[in-house]
Amino acid sequence: MFKLGLCQMHVTADKAENLRHAGELIRQAAAQGANVVTLPEMFNCPYENACFPLYGEPAGGESWQFLSGIAKELGIYLIGGSVPELEEGKIYNTSYIFSPEGKELARHRKVHLFDIDVPGGQRFMESDTLTAGDTFTVVDTPYGKIGVAICFDIRFSDFFRVMGDMGAQLIVIPAAFNMTTGPIHWDLAFRMRALDNQCFIAGCSPARDVNASYVAYGHSLVCNPWGDIIAQLDEKEGVRVVDIDLDDLAKYRGQIPILAGRRTDMYRTEKLK
């Protein structure tokens, strides 16, 4: 049993203010006993292609230092939402994961870029500015194996199945669904990935800002291996701390043996070399 903290925060055009405010929410989660805390996708800047190169930083930059420092200060595992990461002339949508000692354990670069065009709804092309990552991210902690993905990654079941094969017991997804896809697909996507892999799945969104150019859906949530939503925020800013009981993995996997019943003689998933 451990506690997972979700920080659904308002994001502004002021990076310094975003970092300061993220610190407030992380401290609230830690004060409520959270052992593992996550921030939302692009927590340090507006979710706009034009902003990614302007707010981008290399690893070790201001946002990285902030995340490392507060993880060490509070003695928590911290999944740092995501930020625009600069490296060798490229920009990645990157989540840094830190230990309670402030050490970077891993970084996940969004693998599946958000390129959609829904007539009468949302159009967004991350590939106009961002480069896709090419790795799976699962880290060992005293609280089990934790996988990390980012937003649009949630739609690719094979990607999550590989993380399941790597032993992920909880997968955390900093994400920013919008007002076209959120009402239809947010709950459904997270519940299905939890059910497919019989693990815990958590999504952490920015709070909704109706004046932003990109309006996030909010509704950060945690789903259990049965596919139930066991905790969910609404569209407003807030912190939610949720008990994660890994004994539920064996319980639900025993009741409906989806993973044990896979016909790996006929089909299988393999981690990319």
Image: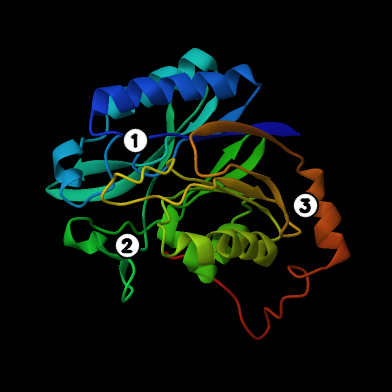
Cβ atoms at labels 1 and 3 below 8 Å apart: no
| Disc ID at residue 11 | 1
Q: In the image, what residue type sits under mark 3?
A: Leu
Numbered disc 3: secondary structure? helix
- Looking at the rendered image, the quarter that the N terminus falls into is top right
Q: In the image, what residue type sits under mark 1?
A: Val
Instruction: Tell me the residue that label 2 is attached to.
Output: 113
Q: Dot 1: few (<14), some (14–19), or many (≥20) neighbours within 10 Å?
A: many
Tell me what residue is drawn at x 76 percent, y 70 percent.
Answer: 258
Cβ atoms at labels 2 and 3 below 8 Å apart: no
Q: Position of residue 19 (x, y in %)?
A: 33, 24
Q: Quadrant of residue 53?
A: top left
Numbered disc 2: secondary structure? loop
Q: Dot 2: few (<14), some (14–19), or many (≥20) neighbours within 10 Å?
A: many
Tell me what residue is drawn at x 76 percent, y 59 percent.
Answer: 226
Instruction: Tell me the residue that label 3 is attached to.
Output: 249
For the residue pair 56 and 162, the one nearer the viewer reads as 56
Q: Position of residue 206 (x, y in %)?
A: 42, 42
Spatial CA span between label 1 and label 3: 34 Å
